[in-house]
Image (cartoon, grey):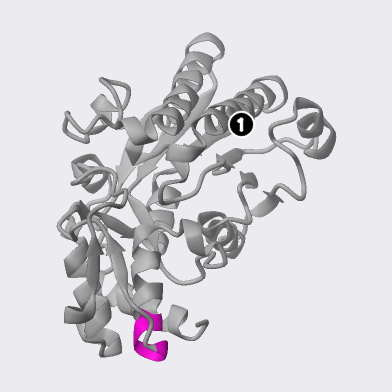
Amino acid sequence: MEILVTGASGFLGQRLCKRLKEDGHNVFEVSSKVCDLTSEESIYYNLPDRKFDQIYHLAAWTRAGDFCLTHQGEQFLINQRLNTNVLGWWKDQQPQAKLIAMGTSCAYSPELPLIEENYLKDIPIDSLFSYAYTKRALYAGMIALNKQFGLKYMLFVPSTLYGPTYHTDRNDHLHFIFDLARKIVRGKKYGEKVTLWGDGYQSRELVHVNDAINAMVALSSHENDIINLGEGNEHTIREFAQIISDHVEYDSSLIEYDTSKYVGAKSKVLNVDKMKRMLPGFKPTPIKEGIVEMVDWMANRE
């Protein structure tokens, strides 16, 4: 197939492009160096005019940590422009292609079960409100273009992705699991103080990036649907920290917890019953095995 991937230079994008090429597809990789997706002119000038079978839309303007708190206006404007331009280009230039896009778990309301039917219901957490609504708007746009013009789409909503080869150069905006690993690895190697945000009892779900890609590729033939991607289990920050500490032989009793820092939702685990029904043979990477793999990769970089 002919496939275009936006966000191709990102953590997920690099690995997805590699997998698609290994599967024999022709892949056109789009990064910010290739095309400014916030500019309609740039899209029509820089993206190829050949016909694609699938468009994976992974690009988004965001970072982890408290970034969403301090960039709410920019996040709304930039992501709205980016997504609207991609939707417009899809409708005008690539109506034969299926748009396969990434949603975000933060679009769910913390007051409702995190099941696909609730993606557009109630209010997302306040600290992630702006970014969450741009992802909701992306999904609404896909539905609208399907209803009026018959365009085909899929939306995947992943829990936090993890694994080796993550961009660790942005030390102030790492996703929580990479921040934990980096701090504990450096605590062991260099004796640095390890301070984690919150009380350590907030819970999170992880899905290995390879598992997410396997599920996306396997489900890419489905049409006009939304599917959560995750392990289906959550663990506390303290549990994650203990796995990392045990592996690198760091004394976890030395870890300090700063309850004044931003932690977001206290609990977040997706309902993945739908994914499991559609992929009955799906077996996620065991959490300890995946974290050890990630920590070993990170330890060699620090």
Q: Which residues are magenta?
A: 185-190
Q: Does residue 11 appear in this view?
A: yes
Q: Which one is nearer the viewer's eye here, 295 or 20?
A: 295
The residue identified by callout 1 is: 78
Picture coordinates of residue 302, whole percent (x, y): 50, 82
Picture coordinates of residue 179, whole percent (x, y): 39, 66
Q: Amino acid at mark 1?
A: Ile
117 relative to 165 in the view: left or right = left
275 in relation to 127, above or below: below
Spot the residue most to the top. Answer: 148
Residue at 55% x, 62% y is: 170
Residue at 49% x, 59% y is: 172
Picture coordinates of residue 159, whole percent (x, y): 32, 49
Asked which secondary structure carries label 1, the reply is: helix
The image quadrant that residue 106 belongs to is: top left
Picture coordinates of residue 232, whole percent (x, y): 19, 51
Q: What secondary structure prevails in the magenta region?
A: helix
Residue at 48% x, 27% y is: 134
252 relative to 137 in the view: left or right = left
163 in relation to 114, above or below: below
